[in-house]
Protein backbone atom coordinates (compact mmCIF):
# COMPACT_ATOMS: atom_id res chain seq x y z
CA UNK A 1 0.00 0.00 0.00
CA UNK A 2 1.13 3.59 -0.53
CA UNK A 3 2.73 5.20 2.52
CA UNK A 4 -0.31 7.26 3.67
CA UNK A 5 -2.40 4.09 4.05
CA UNK A 6 -1.87 2.28 7.36
CA UNK A 7 -1.99 -1.50 7.18
CA UNK A 8 -2.08 -4.21 9.88
CA UNK A 9 1.30 -4.65 11.52
CA UNK A 10 0.35 -8.10 12.83
CA UNK A 11 0.32 -11.50 11.14
CA UNK A 12 -3.36 -12.10 10.44
CA UNK A 13 -2.71 -15.81 9.97
CA UNK A 14 -1.47 -16.03 13.55
CA UNK A 15 -4.41 -14.36 15.33
CA UNK A 16 -7.22 -16.57 16.62
CA UNK A 17 -10.96 -16.06 16.78
CA UNK A 18 -12.54 -14.97 20.04
CA UNK A 19 -15.46 -12.63 19.24
CA UNK A 20 -18.47 -13.46 17.10
CA UNK A 21 -20.10 -10.24 15.91
CA UNK A 22 -23.56 -10.16 14.36
CA UNK A 23 -24.27 -7.16 12.14
CA UNK A 24 -21.33 -5.99 10.02
CA UNK A 25 -22.66 -2.56 9.12
CA UNK A 26 -20.56 0.57 8.81
CA UNK A 27 -20.85 1.50 12.47
CA UNK A 28 -19.40 -1.75 13.80
CA UNK A 29 -16.55 -1.69 11.29
CA UNK A 30 -15.69 1.91 12.26
CA UNK A 31 -16.04 1.29 15.99
CA UNK A 32 -15.57 -2.08 17.73
CA UNK A 33 -13.47 -3.44 14.86
CA UNK A 34 -11.17 -0.41 15.06
CA UNK A 35 -10.60 -0.80 18.80
CA UNK A 36 -9.73 -4.46 18.27
CA UNK A 37 -7.48 -3.64 15.32
CA UNK A 38 -5.65 -1.12 17.54
CA UNK A 39 -5.04 -3.86 20.11
CA UNK A 40 -3.77 -6.32 17.51
CA UNK A 41 -1.42 -3.68 16.12
CA UNK A 42 0.05 -3.39 19.62
CA UNK A 43 0.63 -7.13 19.82
CA UNK A 44 -2.28 -7.58 22.24
CA UNK A 45 -5.54 -9.60 22.13
CA UNK A 46 -4.11 -12.12 19.67
CA UNK A 47 -6.84 -14.63 20.55
CA UNK A 48 -9.73 -12.16 20.24
CA UNK A 49 -10.06 -11.75 16.46
CA UNK A 50 -13.50 -11.12 15.00
CA UNK A 51 -15.74 -13.58 13.21
CA UNK A 52 -18.46 -11.73 11.33
CA UNK A 53 -22.02 -12.90 10.88
CA UNK A 54 -25.28 -11.62 9.46
CA UNK A 55 -28.90 -12.66 9.67
CA UNK A 56 -30.38 -10.48 6.89
CA UNK A 57 -30.56 -11.39 3.23
CA UNK A 58 -28.42 -8.38 2.28
CA UNK A 59 -25.61 -9.67 4.47
CA UNK A 60 -24.87 -12.40 1.93
CA UNK A 61 -23.78 -9.81 -0.64
CA UNK A 62 -21.58 -8.10 1.94
CA UNK A 63 -19.99 -11.45 2.82
CA UNK A 64 -19.22 -12.11 -0.84
CA UNK A 65 -17.64 -8.68 -1.28
CA UNK A 66 -15.51 -8.91 1.85
CA UNK A 67 -14.45 -12.51 1.21
CA UNK A 68 -13.11 -11.42 -2.18
CA UNK A 69 -10.72 -9.07 -0.35
CA UNK A 70 -9.76 -11.48 2.47
CA UNK A 71 -12.17 -9.78 4.89
CA UNK A 72 -10.05 -6.64 4.81
CA UNK A 73 -11.77 -3.27 4.56
CA UNK A 74 -10.81 0.39 4.57
CA UNK A 75 -11.79 2.93 7.23
CA UNK A 76 -11.34 6.59 6.29
CA UNK A 77 -11.48 9.19 9.05
CA UNK A 78 -12.23 12.64 7.66
CA UNK A 79 -12.26 16.20 8.95
CA UNK A 80 -11.01 19.62 7.85
CA UNK A 81 -7.41 18.52 8.50
CA UNK A 82 -7.61 15.78 5.88
CA UNK A 83 -7.96 12.00 5.62
CA UNK A 84 -6.62 9.22 7.81
CA UNK A 85 -6.85 5.97 5.82
CA UNK A 86 -6.28 2.52 7.30
CA UNK A 87 -6.84 -1.09 6.31
CA UNK A 88 -8.50 -3.05 9.11
CA UNK A 89 -7.66 -6.73 9.49
CA UNK A 90 -9.36 -7.61 12.76
CA UNK A 91 -12.02 -9.80 11.11
CA UNK A 92 -10.69 -13.23 10.11
CA UNK A 93 -13.91 -14.84 8.89
CA UNK A 94 -17.45 -13.98 7.78
CA UNK A 95 -19.95 -16.80 8.23
CA UNK A 96 -22.20 -17.91 5.41
CA UNK A 97 -25.71 -16.48 5.62
CA UNK A 98 -28.15 -19.41 5.48
CA UNK A 99 -31.78 -20.09 6.31
CA UNK A 100 -31.86 -21.65 9.75
CA UNK A 101 -28.58 -19.93 10.68
CA UNK A 102 -26.66 -23.21 10.97
CA UNK A 103 -23.19 -21.58 10.54
CA UNK A 104 -24.04 -18.99 13.19
CA UNK A 105 -25.24 -21.62 15.64
CA UNK A 106 -22.13 -23.72 15.02
CA UNK A 107 -19.88 -20.75 15.73
CA UNK A 108 -21.68 -20.11 19.03
CA UNK A 109 -20.88 -23.68 20.06
CA UNK A 110 -17.15 -23.12 19.50
CA UNK A 111 -15.43 -22.77 22.93
CA UNK A 112 -12.99 -20.27 21.38
CA UNK A 113 -15.86 -17.80 21.01
CA UNK A 114 -16.07 -16.05 24.38
CA UNK A 115 -18.01 -12.95 23.36
CA UNK A 116 -21.02 -12.71 21.07
CA UNK A 117 -21.53 -9.04 20.21
CA UNK A 118 -24.19 -7.48 18.04
CA UNK A 119 -25.38 -4.36 16.27
CA UNK A 120 -28.93 -5.01 15.10
CA UNK A 121 -30.20 -1.37 15.13
CA UNK A 122 -32.31 0.44 17.70
CA UNK A 123 -35.48 -1.26 16.51
CA UNK A 124 -34.13 -4.81 16.59
CA UNK A 125 -34.76 -5.62 20.25
CA UNK A 126 -38.55 -6.11 20.27
CA UNK A 127 -39.13 -3.39 22.85
CA UNK A 128 -42.58 -1.86 23.25
CA UNK A 129 -42.41 1.94 23.41
CA UNK A 130 -45.66 1.90 25.37
CA UNK A 131 -44.25 -0.23 28.20
CA UNK A 132 -40.53 0.30 27.64
CA UNK A 133 -39.97 -3.42 28.09
CA UNK A 134 -39.48 -6.51 25.96
CA UNK A 135 -42.56 -7.50 23.97
CA UNK A 136 -42.91 -11.32 24.08
CA UNK A 137 -46.10 -11.18 22.02
CA UNK A 138 -44.28 -10.21 18.83
CA UNK A 139 -44.94 -12.89 16.18
CA UNK A 140 -41.22 -13.46 15.53
CA UNK A 141 -40.59 -14.04 19.23
CA UNK A 142 -43.58 -16.34 19.57
CA UNK A 143 -42.32 -18.34 16.59
CA UNK A 144 -38.88 -18.77 18.17
CA UNK A 145 -40.38 -19.79 21.50
CA UNK A 146 -42.45 -22.47 19.76
CA UNK A 147 -39.61 -23.70 17.50
CA UNK A 148 -36.44 -23.84 19.56
CA UNK A 149 -34.83 -26.12 16.99
CA UNK A 150 -35.23 -23.59 14.18
CA UNK A 151 -34.82 -20.07 15.59
CA UNK A 152 -35.11 -17.13 13.22
CA UNK A 153 -34.35 -14.11 15.41
CA UNK A 154 -30.84 -13.36 16.59
CA UNK A 155 -31.99 -13.79 20.19
CA UNK A 156 -33.47 -17.18 19.45
CA UNK A 157 -30.15 -18.21 17.92
CA UNK A 158 -28.28 -16.95 21.00
CA UNK A 159 -30.54 -19.04 23.24
CA UNK A 160 -29.88 -22.07 21.03
CA UNK A 161 -26.13 -21.43 21.22
CA UNK A 162 -26.19 -21.14 25.00
CA UNK A 163 -28.29 -24.31 25.25
CA UNK A 164 -25.69 -26.20 23.23
CA UNK A 165 -22.82 -24.82 25.38
CA UNK A 166 -24.59 -25.91 28.56
CA UNK A 167 -25.29 -29.38 27.19
CA UNK A 168 -21.63 -29.77 26.18
CA UNK A 169 -20.35 -28.54 29.54
CA UNK A 170 -18.69 -25.52 27.89
CA UNK A 171 -18.56 -22.16 29.64
CA UNK A 172 -21.04 -19.67 28.17
CA UNK A 173 -20.08 -16.59 26.22
CA UNK A 174 -20.72 -12.96 27.12
CA UNK A 175 -23.52 -11.32 25.13
CA UNK A 176 -22.47 -7.73 24.37
CA UNK A 177 -24.80 -5.32 22.62
CA UNK A 178 -23.08 -2.52 20.72
CA UNK A 179 -26.30 -0.82 19.63
CA UNK A 180 -27.30 2.73 20.37
CA UNK A 181 -29.97 1.70 22.88
CA UNK A 182 -30.31 2.84 26.52
CA UNK A 183 -29.13 0.05 28.82
CA UNK A 184 -28.42 -2.05 25.75
CA UNK A 185 -27.09 -4.96 27.81
CA UNK A 186 -30.21 -5.10 29.97
CA UNK A 187 -32.41 -4.82 26.88
CA UNK A 188 -30.50 -7.63 25.19
CA UNK A 189 -30.76 -9.79 28.31
CA UNK A 190 -34.52 -9.26 28.42
CA UNK A 191 -34.85 -10.48 24.83
CA UNK A 192 -32.72 -13.58 25.46
CA UNK A 193 -34.50 -14.42 28.70
CA UNK A 194 -37.87 -13.68 27.12
CA UNK A 195 -37.27 -16.59 24.75
CA UNK A 196 -35.39 -18.89 27.12
CA UNK A 197 -37.84 -18.79 30.05
CA UNK A 198 -40.92 -20.15 28.24
CA UNK A 199 -38.76 -22.71 26.43
CA UNK A 200 -36.81 -24.13 29.37
CA UNK A 201 -36.92 -22.78 32.94
CA UNK A 202 -33.72 -24.59 33.92
CA UNK A 203 -31.82 -23.17 30.94
CA UNK A 204 -33.15 -19.70 31.75
CA UNK A 205 -31.91 -20.05 35.33
CA UNK A 206 -28.47 -21.12 34.09
CA UNK A 207 -28.31 -18.14 31.73
CA UNK A 208 -29.39 -15.75 34.48
CA UNK A 209 -26.68 -17.06 36.79
CA UNK A 210 -23.80 -17.45 34.35
CA UNK A 211 -24.12 -15.13 31.34
CA UNK A 212 -23.01 -11.48 31.44
CA UNK A 213 -24.77 -8.78 29.43
CA UNK A 214 -22.67 -5.63 29.93
CA UNK A 215 -24.21 -2.25 29.18
CA UNK A 216 -22.24 0.06 26.93
CA UNK A 217 -22.41 3.49 25.31
CA UNK A 218 -21.07 3.69 21.76
CA UNK A 219 -20.46 6.78 19.67
CA UNK A 220 -19.06 7.61 16.25
CA UNK A 221 -20.77 9.37 13.35
CA UNK A 222 -20.59 6.93 10.46
CA UNK A 223 -22.59 7.87 7.35
CA UNK A 224 -23.60 5.52 4.59
CA UNK A 225 -20.97 4.74 1.96
CA UNK A 226 -21.93 6.16 -1.42
CA UNK A 227 -20.54 5.38 -4.89
CA UNK A 228 -19.03 8.87 -4.87
CA UNK A 229 -17.08 8.02 -1.71
CA UNK A 230 -15.82 4.79 -3.24
CA UNK A 231 -14.76 6.72 -6.33
CA UNK A 232 -12.95 9.25 -4.13
CA UNK A 233 -11.01 6.44 -2.44
CA UNK A 234 -10.01 5.02 -5.80
CA UNK A 235 -9.04 8.39 -7.25
CA UNK A 236 -7.17 9.87 -4.28
CA UNK A 237 -5.54 6.71 -2.91
CA UNK A 238 -5.64 4.28 -5.85
CA UNK A 239 -7.50 1.90 -3.57
CA UNK A 240 -10.36 -0.32 -4.74
CA UNK A 241 -12.63 -1.46 -1.90
CA UNK A 242 -16.12 -2.91 -2.32
CA UNK A 243 -17.06 -2.08 1.28
CA UNK A 244 -15.12 0.94 2.60
CA UNK A 245 -16.28 2.89 5.64
CA UNK A 246 -16.04 6.67 6.09
CA UNK A 247 -16.39 8.33 9.50
CA UNK A 248 -15.42 11.23 11.73
CA UNK A 249 -12.17 11.06 13.75
CA UNK A 250 -14.04 11.11 17.10
CA UNK A 251 -14.98 7.82 18.74
CA UNK A 252 -16.07 6.81 22.22
CA UNK A 253 -16.93 3.57 23.98
CA UNK A 254 -17.96 3.45 27.63
CA UNK A 255 -18.46 -0.07 28.93
CA UNK A 256 -19.34 -1.90 32.12
CA UNK A 257 -16.65 -4.42 33.08
CA UNK A 258 -18.89 -7.49 33.35
CA UNK A 259 -17.74 -10.42 31.20
CA UNK A 260 -18.37 -14.15 31.52
CA UNK A 261 -15.14 -15.57 30.09
CA UNK A 262 -12.63 -12.73 29.87
CA UNK A 263 -12.29 -9.87 27.42
CA UNK A 264 -9.68 -8.05 25.33
CA UNK A 265 -7.74 -5.33 27.21
CA UNK A 266 -9.78 -2.60 25.55
CA UNK A 267 -8.75 -0.06 28.17
CA UNK A 268 -5.32 -0.02 26.50
CA UNK A 269 -6.83 1.63 23.41
CA UNK A 270 -9.20 4.14 24.95
CA UNK A 271 -12.30 2.25 26.04
CA UNK A 272 -13.56 3.66 29.32
CA UNK A 273 -14.66 1.02 31.84
CA UNK A 274 -17.13 2.24 34.45
CA UNK A 275 -19.30 0.58 37.12
CA UNK A 276 -22.48 2.14 35.70
CA UNK A 277 -22.85 3.36 32.13
CA UNK A 278 -26.25 5.00 32.71
CA UNK A 279 -25.08 8.64 33.01
CA UNK A 280 -23.05 8.37 29.80
CA UNK A 281 -25.99 6.78 27.97
CA UNK A 282 -28.35 9.55 28.99
CA UNK A 283 -25.86 12.19 27.92
CA UNK A 284 -25.19 10.72 24.51
CA UNK A 285 -28.69 9.56 23.58
CA UNK A 286 -30.44 12.71 24.76
CA UNK A 287 -27.89 15.33 23.62
CA UNK A 288 -26.31 13.79 20.50
CA UNK A 289 -29.03 11.51 19.11
CA UNK A 290 -31.78 13.87 20.20
CA UNK A 291 -29.80 16.68 18.59
CA UNK A 292 -29.60 14.77 15.33
CA UNK A 293 -33.40 14.49 15.30
CA UNK A 294 -33.76 18.22 15.95
CA UNK A 295 -31.70 19.22 12.92
CA UNK A 296 -32.93 16.33 10.76
CA UNK A 297 -36.63 17.02 10.30
CA UNK A 298 -36.33 20.80 10.20
CA UNK A 299 -33.51 20.45 7.65
CA UNK A 300 -35.32 17.75 5.70
CA UNK A 301 -38.45 19.86 5.26
CA UNK A 302 -36.38 22.77 3.97
CA UNK A 303 -34.58 20.61 1.41
CA UNK A 304 -31.19 20.61 3.15
CA UNK A 305 -29.08 17.63 2.10
CA UNK A 306 -26.28 17.34 4.68
CA UNK A 307 -25.94 17.75 8.45
CA UNK A 308 -23.13 20.29 8.14
CA UNK A 309 -25.30 22.36 5.81
CA UNK A 310 -28.08 22.26 8.39
CA UNK A 311 -25.60 23.58 10.96
CA UNK A 312 -24.74 26.41 8.57
CA UNK A 313 -28.42 27.37 8.43
CA UNK A 314 -28.99 30.01 11.10
CA UNK A 315 -32.53 28.90 11.95
CA UNK A 316 -31.67 25.21 12.28
CA UNK A 317 -28.48 25.85 14.25
CA UNK A 318 -30.24 28.18 16.67
CA UNK A 319 -33.17 25.76 16.96
CA UNK A 320 -30.75 23.03 18.03
CA UNK A 321 -29.06 25.28 20.58
CA UNK A 322 -32.31 26.53 22.11
CA UNK A 323 -33.92 23.11 22.52
CA UNK A 324 -30.73 21.58 23.88
CA UNK A 325 -29.99 24.31 26.41
CA UNK A 326 -33.57 24.83 27.59
CA UNK A 327 -35.22 21.40 27.38
CA UNK A 328 -32.61 18.64 27.08
CA UNK A 329 -29.40 19.46 28.95
CA UNK A 330 -31.21 20.67 32.11
CA UNK A 331 -32.89 17.27 32.59
CA UNK A 332 -29.80 15.13 31.80
CA UNK A 333 -28.35 13.81 35.11
CA UNK A 334 -24.75 14.76 35.95
CA UNK A 335 -22.01 12.69 34.33
CA UNK A 336 -18.76 11.96 36.22
CA UNK A 337 -15.91 14.29 35.25
CA UNK A 338 -17.91 15.73 32.35
CA UNK A 339 -19.27 19.18 31.56
CA UNK A 340 -22.55 18.78 29.68
CA UNK A 341 -22.13 22.24 28.20
CA UNK A 342 -18.69 21.37 26.85
CA UNK A 343 -20.06 18.06 25.59
CA UNK A 344 -22.75 19.91 23.64
CA UNK A 345 -20.14 22.24 22.12
CA UNK A 346 -18.24 19.14 20.99
CA UNK A 347 -21.46 17.81 19.46
CA UNK A 348 -22.00 21.05 17.55
CA UNK A 349 -18.46 20.84 16.15
CA UNK A 350 -18.99 17.22 15.13
CA UNK A 351 -22.31 17.97 13.42
CA UNK A 352 -20.56 20.78 11.53
CA UNK A 353 -17.77 18.59 10.09
CA UNK A 354 -18.15 19.12 6.30
CA UNK A 355 -16.03 16.10 5.37
CA UNK A 356 -18.34 13.55 6.95
CA UNK A 357 -21.19 14.51 4.59
CA UNK A 358 -23.74 12.86 6.87
CA UNK A 359 -27.04 13.11 5.03
CA UNK A 360 -30.16 14.59 6.56
CA UNK A 361 -32.07 11.67 5.07
CA UNK A 362 -29.98 9.20 7.11
CA UNK A 363 -30.68 11.20 10.26
CA UNK A 364 -34.41 11.15 9.46
CA UNK A 365 -34.37 7.37 8.96
CA UNK A 366 -36.39 5.06 11.23
CA UNK A 367 -38.02 7.72 13.36
CA UNK A 368 -40.62 5.23 14.60
CA UNK A 369 -37.86 3.41 16.45
CA UNK A 370 -35.62 6.37 17.25
CA UNK A 371 -38.11 8.94 18.53
CA UNK A 372 -39.24 6.76 21.47
CA UNK A 373 -35.63 6.45 22.59
CA UNK A 374 -34.07 9.81 21.68
CA UNK A 375 -36.86 12.39 22.06
CA UNK A 376 -39.91 11.09 23.94
CA UNK A 377 -37.98 10.37 27.19
CA UNK A 378 -36.82 14.00 27.32
CA UNK A 379 -40.41 15.14 26.81
CA UNK A 380 -41.60 12.82 29.59
CA UNK A 381 -38.91 13.96 32.06
CA UNK A 382 -39.72 17.62 31.47
CA UNK A 383 -43.43 17.05 31.90
CA UNK A 384 -42.82 15.09 35.09
CA UNK A 385 -40.85 18.06 36.41
CA UNK A 386 -43.67 20.42 35.45
CA UNK A 387 -41.65 22.10 32.70
CA UNK A 388 -43.03 23.13 29.28
CA UNK A 389 -41.72 21.49 26.11
CA UNK A 390 -42.38 23.90 23.22
CA UNK A 391 -39.15 22.97 21.42
CA UNK A 392 -39.49 19.20 21.78
CA UNK A 393 -43.16 19.42 20.82
CA UNK A 394 -42.11 21.35 17.72
CA UNK A 395 -39.52 18.67 16.90
CA UNK A 396 -42.25 16.05 17.15
CA UNK A 397 -44.53 18.13 14.92
CA UNK A 398 -41.71 18.48 12.38
CA UNK A 399 -41.34 14.70 12.32
CA UNK A 400 -45.08 14.37 11.72
CA UNK A 401 -44.95 16.95 8.92
CA UNK A 402 -41.95 15.14 7.36
CA UNK A 403 -43.84 11.83 7.38
CA UNK A 404 -46.60 13.43 5.32
CA UNK A 405 -44.27 12.65 2.44
CA UNK A 406 -43.51 16.03 0.87
CA UNK A 407 -41.12 18.81 1.83
CA UNK A 408 -41.70 22.58 1.92
CA UNK A 409 -41.02 22.80 -1.82
CA UNK A 410 -43.53 20.10 -2.68
CA UNK A 411 -40.84 17.52 -3.49
CA UNK A 412 -41.72 13.94 -2.62
CA UNK A 413 -39.95 12.41 0.39
CA UNK A 414 -39.21 8.79 -0.42
CA UNK A 415 -40.15 6.15 2.18
CA UNK A 416 -37.71 6.45 5.05
CA UNK A 417 -38.98 4.22 7.84
CA UNK A 418 -39.90 0.53 8.23
CA UNK A 419 -43.39 1.78 9.16
CA UNK A 420 -43.56 4.48 6.48
CA UNK A 421 -47.02 3.58 5.18
CA UNK A 422 -48.46 3.72 8.66
CA UNK A 423 -46.68 6.97 9.50
CA UNK A 424 -47.80 8.61 6.26
CA UNK A 425 -51.40 7.61 6.85
CA UNK A 426 -51.32 9.04 10.38
CA UNK A 427 -49.59 12.23 9.22
CA UNK A 428 -52.24 12.82 6.56
CA UNK A 429 -54.97 12.45 9.15
CA UNK A 430 -53.07 14.68 11.55
CA UNK A 431 -53.01 17.55 9.06
CA UNK A 432 -56.61 18.26 10.06
CA UNK A 433 -56.71 16.24 13.30
CA UNK A 434 -53.34 16.63 15.12
CA UNK A 435 -54.42 14.17 17.81
CA UNK A 436 -54.28 11.41 15.19
CA UNK A 437 -50.48 11.50 15.32
CA UNK A 438 -50.47 11.04 19.08
CA UNK A 439 -52.68 7.95 18.79
CA UNK A 440 -49.50 5.93 18.18
CA UNK A 441 -49.15 4.62 21.71
CA UNK A 442 -46.25 2.38 20.80
CA UNK A 443 -44.25 5.56 20.11
CA UNK A 444 -45.54 8.14 22.58
CA UNK A 445 -46.81 5.95 25.41
CA UNK A 446 -48.44 7.89 28.24
CA UNK A 447 -46.79 11.12 27.07
CA UNK A 448 -49.48 11.50 24.41
CA UNK A 449 -52.12 11.84 27.11
CA UNK A 450 -50.45 14.82 28.79
CA UNK A 451 -52.59 17.93 28.14
CA UNK A 452 -49.60 20.32 28.07
CA UNK A 453 -47.76 18.25 25.47
CA UNK A 454 -50.87 17.73 23.35
CA UNK A 455 -51.54 21.46 23.34
CA UNK A 456 -47.96 22.35 22.36
CA UNK A 457 -47.81 19.66 19.68
CA UNK A 458 -51.18 20.66 18.20
CA UNK A 459 -50.23 24.32 18.04
CA UNK A 460 -46.87 23.52 16.43
CA UNK A 461 -48.31 21.22 13.78
CA UNK A 462 -51.09 23.64 12.84
CA UNK A 463 -48.53 26.44 12.55
CA UNK A 464 -46.28 24.33 10.32
CA UNK A 465 -49.11 23.69 7.88
CA UNK A 466 -50.32 27.30 8.04
CA UNK A 467 -47.03 29.22 8.00
CA UNK A 468 -44.24 26.85 6.91
CA UNK A 469 -41.10 25.61 8.63
CA UNK A 470 -38.97 28.74 8.42
CA UNK A 471 -41.65 31.01 9.85
CA UNK A 472 -42.44 28.60 12.68
CA UNK A 473 -38.78 28.19 13.59
CA UNK A 474 -38.31 31.93 13.60
CA UNK A 475 -41.35 32.40 15.84
CA UNK A 476 -40.08 29.77 18.27
CA UNK A 477 -36.62 31.35 18.39
CA UNK A 478 -38.13 34.78 18.99
CA UNK A 479 -39.96 33.41 22.01
Image (spheres, rainbow, N blue to C red):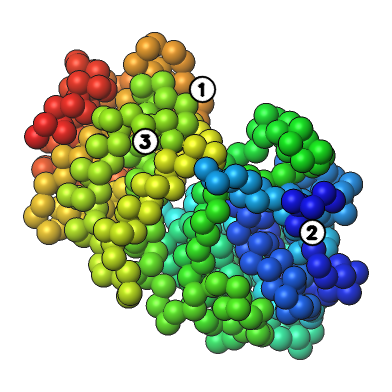
Left or right side of 85 for 391? left
Instruction: Say left or right for 115 vs 387.
Output: right
The residue mark sitting in front, 1 or 3, is 3
User: Which of the two labelled residues, at mark 3 and mark 2, occupies the earlier sequence position?
Assistant: 2
Q: Against 26, is 463 above or below?
A: above
In x, y percent, where is residue 172?
A: 68, 81
Q: x%, y% of residue 224?
A: 60, 39
Residue 295 vertical position relative to residue 185 in the rendered view, above or below = above
Q: Nearer the viewer, mark 2 or mark 1?
A: 2
Q: Secondary structure at mark 3?
A: helix
- Determine whether, in the image, residue 442 is placed left or right of residue 245: left
Q: What is the spatial separation of the Cα atoms under label 1 and label 3, in whole angstroms? A: 23 Å
Kindly identify which numbered label has been placed on residue 423.
Answer: none
For disc 3, the marked residue is: 311
Q: Which residue is mark 1?
A: 414
Q: Residue shown at 25%/67% (left/top)?
A: 333
The part of the image, by quadrant, that contains residue 351 is top left
Residue depicted at 37% across the width and 70% down the height? 278
Task: Find numbered disc 1 in the image and state the secondary structure of the residue it sits on.
Answer: loop
> Is residue 264 in view from this perspective?
yes
Residue 218 % position (x, y): 50, 61
Q: Earlier in the sequence, mark 2 or mark 1?
A: 2
Of residue 260 and residue 109, the one placed in the foreground of this image is 260
Instruction: Name the element at disc 2.
Output: loop
Callout 3 crowding tier (Cα within 10 Å): few <14, some 14–19, many ≥20: many
Please name the residue that numbered disc 2 is placed on.
Answer: 7
Residue located 38% across and 51% down the image: 347
Residue at 51%, 66% in the rendered image: 253
N-terminal-most mark, 1 or 3: 3
Q: CA distance from mark 2 to mark 1?
A: 39 Å
Amino acid sequence: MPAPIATPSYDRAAVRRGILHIGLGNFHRAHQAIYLDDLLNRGLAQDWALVGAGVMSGDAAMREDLAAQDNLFTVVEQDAAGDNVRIVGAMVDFLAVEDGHAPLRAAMEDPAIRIVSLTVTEGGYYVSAETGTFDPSHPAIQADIANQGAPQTVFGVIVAGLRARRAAGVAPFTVMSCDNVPHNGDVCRAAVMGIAEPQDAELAGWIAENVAFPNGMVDRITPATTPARQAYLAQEFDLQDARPVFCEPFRQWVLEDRFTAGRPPFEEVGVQFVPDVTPYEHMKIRILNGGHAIIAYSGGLMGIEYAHEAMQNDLVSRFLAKVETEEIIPIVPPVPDTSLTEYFELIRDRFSNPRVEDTIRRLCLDGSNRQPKFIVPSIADNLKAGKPVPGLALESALWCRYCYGTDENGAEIAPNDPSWDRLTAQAKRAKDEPDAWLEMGDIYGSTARDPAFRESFTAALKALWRDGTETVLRAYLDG
